[in-house]
Protein backbone atom coordinates (compact mmCIF):
# COMPACT_ATOMS: atom_id res chain seq x y z
CA UNK A 1 0.00 0.00 0.00
CA UNK A 2 1.52 3.27 -1.10
CA UNK A 3 0.43 6.47 0.63
CA UNK A 4 0.19 9.75 -1.18
CA UNK A 5 1.90 12.08 1.30
CA UNK A 6 1.83 15.12 -0.92
CA UNK A 7 -1.59 16.09 0.47
CA UNK A 8 -0.27 15.73 4.02
CA UNK A 9 2.74 17.87 3.22
CA UNK A 10 0.53 20.54 1.65
CA UNK A 11 -1.78 20.70 4.71
CA UNK A 12 -1.63 23.92 6.73
CA UNK A 13 0.51 23.67 9.85
CA UNK A 14 -0.50 24.35 13.44
CA UNK A 15 2.00 27.10 14.16
CA UNK A 16 1.49 27.17 17.94
CA UNK A 17 4.70 27.99 19.78
CA UNK A 18 6.23 25.12 21.71
CA UNK A 19 8.45 25.47 24.78
CA UNK A 20 11.52 25.87 22.65
CA UNK A 21 9.90 28.83 20.92
CA UNK A 22 9.63 27.17 17.51
CA UNK A 23 6.26 26.73 15.80
CA UNK A 24 4.50 23.36 15.97
CA UNK A 25 4.91 21.42 12.74
CA UNK A 26 1.86 19.15 13.13
CA UNK A 27 -0.89 19.54 10.53
CA UNK A 28 -3.85 21.66 11.63
CA UNK A 29 -7.21 19.93 11.96
CA UNK A 30 -9.75 20.38 9.16
CA UNK A 31 -11.50 23.72 9.46
CA UNK A 32 -9.24 24.79 12.34
CA UNK A 33 -6.00 26.67 12.71
CA UNK A 34 -4.41 24.41 15.37
CA UNK A 35 -3.53 20.72 15.67
CA UNK A 36 -5.29 18.31 18.05
CA UNK A 37 -2.58 18.80 20.66
CA UNK A 38 -2.92 22.58 20.72
CA UNK A 39 -6.70 22.91 20.96
CA UNK A 40 -7.89 22.07 17.47
CA UNK A 41 -10.47 19.63 18.84
CA UNK A 42 -11.90 22.20 21.25
CA UNK A 43 -15.14 23.62 19.84
CA UNK A 44 -14.58 26.91 21.69
CA UNK A 45 -16.84 28.94 23.92
CA UNK A 46 -20.60 28.81 23.42
CA UNK A 47 -22.01 31.39 21.03
CA UNK A 48 -24.22 34.11 22.42
CA UNK A 49 -25.59 34.32 25.96
CA UNK A 50 -28.33 31.68 25.98
CA UNK A 51 -27.87 30.71 29.61
CA UNK A 52 -28.03 34.27 30.91
CA UNK A 53 -31.35 34.73 29.16
CA UNK A 54 -32.66 31.58 30.89
CA UNK A 55 -31.83 32.94 34.34
CA UNK A 56 -33.18 36.39 33.45
CA UNK A 57 -30.14 38.33 34.64
CA UNK A 58 -29.74 40.16 31.33
CA UNK A 59 -33.39 40.88 30.60
CA UNK A 60 -35.08 44.19 31.35
CA UNK A 61 -36.99 42.64 34.25
CA UNK A 62 -33.82 41.09 35.64
CA UNK A 63 -31.95 44.38 35.52
CA UNK A 64 -34.82 46.15 37.27
CA UNK A 65 -34.91 43.48 39.99
CA UNK A 66 -31.15 43.76 40.50
CA UNK A 67 -31.42 47.55 40.82
CA UNK A 68 -34.26 47.20 43.35
CA UNK A 69 -32.23 44.71 45.41
CA UNK A 70 -29.22 47.06 45.38
CA UNK A 71 -31.40 49.97 46.56
CA UNK A 72 -32.82 47.82 49.39
CA UNK A 73 -29.28 46.79 50.45
CA UNK A 74 -28.16 50.43 50.49
CA UNK A 75 -31.16 51.40 52.63
CA UNK A 76 -30.40 48.57 55.07
CA UNK A 77 -26.75 49.62 55.27
CA UNK A 78 -27.72 53.25 55.92
CA UNK A 79 -30.08 52.17 58.72
CA UNK A 80 -27.39 49.95 60.24
CA UNK A 81 -24.82 52.77 60.06
CA UNK A 82 -27.29 55.08 61.83
CA UNK A 83 -27.93 52.53 64.62
CA UNK A 84 -24.21 51.92 65.07
CA UNK A 85 -23.56 55.67 65.20
CA UNK A 86 -26.21 56.14 67.90
CA UNK A 87 -24.84 53.21 69.89
CA UNK A 88 -21.32 54.61 69.61
CA UNK A 89 -22.53 58.01 70.84
CA UNK A 90 -24.28 56.38 73.81
CA UNK A 91 -21.18 54.36 74.73
CA UNK A 92 -18.92 57.42 74.41
CA UNK A 93 -21.28 59.44 76.61
CA UNK A 94 -21.30 56.66 79.24
CA UNK A 95 -17.50 56.47 79.10
CA UNK A 96 -17.27 60.26 79.49
CA UNK A 97 -19.56 60.11 82.53
CA UNK A 98 -17.43 57.32 84.00
CA UNK A 99 -14.25 59.33 83.39
CA UNK A 100 -15.81 62.38 85.06
CA UNK A 101 -16.84 60.26 88.05
CA UNK A 102 -13.37 58.70 88.25
CA UNK A 103 -11.76 62.14 88.00
CA UNK A 104 -13.99 63.43 90.78
CA UNK A 105 -13.04 60.41 92.92
CA UNK A 106 -9.34 60.90 92.16
CA UNK A 107 -8.95 57.71 90.05
CA UNK A 108 -6.95 57.67 86.84
CA UNK A 109 -6.75 55.18 83.97
CA UNK A 110 -3.68 53.22 82.98
CA UNK A 111 -2.35 56.07 80.78
CA UNK A 112 -4.42 58.97 81.95
CA UNK A 113 -7.85 58.92 80.30
CA UNK A 114 -9.20 55.81 78.50
CA UNK A 115 -9.70 55.99 74.76
CA UNK A 116 -13.11 56.54 73.16
CA UNK A 117 -15.13 53.48 72.15
CA UNK A 118 -15.48 52.80 68.38
CA UNK A 119 -17.85 50.21 66.94
CA UNK A 120 -16.93 50.45 63.28
Image (cartoon, rainbow, N blue to C red):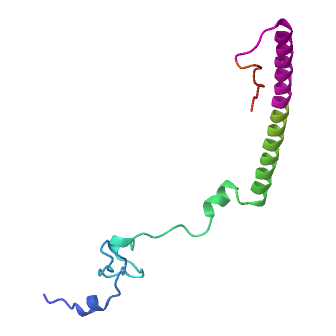
Which residue occupies the extreme left position in the image? Answer: 1
Counting from the top left corner in percent of width and height, residue 24 is at 31, 79
| Displayed quadrant of residue 28 | bottom left
Task: Name the foreground residue: 97 vs 26.
Answer: 97
Q: Residue at x 39, y 74 (%)?
A: 40
Q: Residue at x 81, y 33 (%)?
A: 80
Task: Name the foreground residue: 93 vs 9.
Answer: 93
On whether residue 88 falls in the magenta region, the answer is yes
Assign the N terminus to one quadrant of the image: bottom left
Counting from the top left corner in percent of width and height, residue 88 is at 82, 26
Q: Is residue 79 left or right of residue 48?
A: right
Q: Magenta segment, principal secondary structure?
A: helix
Q: Is residue 26 left or right of residue 84?
A: left
Q: Is residue 43 left or right of residue 92?
A: left
Badge count: 0
On whether residue 34 falls in the magenta region, the answer is no
- Extent of the magenta region: 83-110
| Displayed quadrant of residue 97 | top right
Q: Residue at x 36, y 72 (%)?
A: 38
Counting from the top left corner in percent of width and height, residue 69 is at 78, 46
Q: Is residue 39 above or below residue 93?
A: below
Q: Residue at x 86, y 9 (%)?
A: 104
Assign the C terminus to one quadrant of the image: top right
Amino acid sequence: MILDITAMRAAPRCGAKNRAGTPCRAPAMRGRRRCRLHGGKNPGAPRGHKRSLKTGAHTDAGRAATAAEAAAREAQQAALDHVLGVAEDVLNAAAAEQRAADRAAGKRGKRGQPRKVKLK
